[in-house]
Amino acid sequence: MEHDDGLVAAARGGDESAFGALVERHRSELRVHCYRMLGSYHDAEDLVQETFLRAWKNIGGFQGRSTVRVWLYRIATNACLDALDSRSRRLLPHHLSGPWDPSGDLPPGTDSWLQPFPDRLWEPAAPSEGEPDAVAVSRETIELAFLVAIQHLPPRQRAVLILRDVLGWPASQAASLLDGSVASVNSALQRARATLREHLPARRLDWAAPAEPTERELAVLRRYVDALERADLATMAELLAEDVRTTMPPYPLWFQGRESVLRALAGSWDPALPDYVGRFRTLPTRANGRPALAGYVRRPGDLHYQPVAISLLWFGGGQITEIVAFHDPGLFPAFDLPPALPAA
């Protein structure tokens, strides 16, 4: 802590490098905190920058009554609450409308949906000496199911739940951060937990860490990749569960059932049809605590495969039960993925 005291003093004197040394160690966990609050990777990046900007402007007022980490969490949480005043909650298309008819035209996309988060960025730095309350990012609380569930909470309840049940802060510390009373924080937490029970999947109320995919599931994933890259509808039909659900944010549509999904794929995979998309290639990655695929497409006339979507898949009974394909090439740099793939 003496080292931090020296950095704080230097930062107060206008030393930007000292300020950077104070705050950069917390970037990873603050990014995850903002992501949980906002449901958007892009917004989380912006809010971390906003947090550091506010911290730099107010470093002179930091009195050392808390750690730098706690001070930054206060700034970040309030920046997120400010942002949420003017933004709607981020869900997935199947939470807001019925399934789409594959024979219809593709509607325009919007930027109001939940986004994925790269696993490579959610492991925080080791706790600093003198900050024993620093906790690892728990895998279960960055799952899409959890992120969707907490989107149903009002912003302040969301903040309380994250601070108390995810980060493990005591009620007094959460109350101080939110400029409220311990009683108000405890009341908000009870209401948040009740709402969460309504929206988390069955048997998930204890937020037990999800298991890694089994060998059987990984074999299904490999067959899926092969079928996708060869445009093999017959194999795809074997791999998809009868009641499979697929969504494609930012497009506000989703498909329910194997027949609907195959009809949509048939139109986009057949070079003789007007909706033909092109040929696909994939690279393995990880998002929100589970294996994922980075999809690239080579459209007619293209010399390279271009990034198209980050897909998360769920399995059951030896088949694929759900696919969420986030169509946002702007996410690929965050996953440290190449901007294009060669045709050969």
Image (cartoon, rainbow, N blue to C red):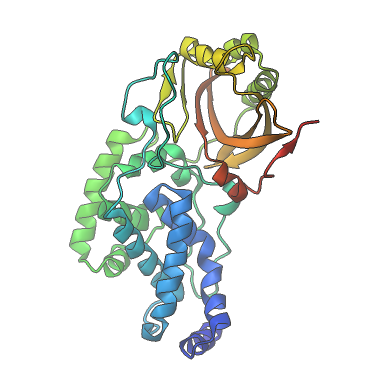
Kindly indicate the quadrant of the structure image that contains residue 44.
bottom left
Q: Is residue 49 above or below residue 35?
A: below
Hey, which residue is sitting farthest right in the picture? 344
The answer to whether residue 219 shows anywhere in this view is: yes
Query: Is 218 on the left or on the right of 66, as rendered?
Result: right
181 or 221: nearer the eye? 221
The answer to whether residue 241 shows anywhere in this view is: no
Query: Which x, y percent locates residue 117?
Result: 52, 46
Query: Is 130 on the left or on the right of 145, as rendered?
Result: right
Query: Which x, y percent locates residue 167?
Result: 41, 57
Query: Is 107 on the left or on the right of 125, as rendered?
Result: left
Query: Which x, y percent locates residue 239?
Result: 59, 15
* Numbered disc total: 0
Query: Which x, y percent locates residue 130?
Result: 50, 75
Residue found at x 65% / y 49%: 336
Q: Is residue 333 above or below residue 94?
A: below
Kindly indicate the quadrant of the structure image that contains residue 250.
top left
- Tell me the quadrant of the picture where the C terminus can be found: top right
Residue found at x 52% / y 35%: 327
Q: Is residue 242 above or below residue 80?
A: above
Residue found at x 60% / y 41%: 286
149 or 174: nearer the eye? 149
Q: Is residue 19 above or below residue 225?
A: below
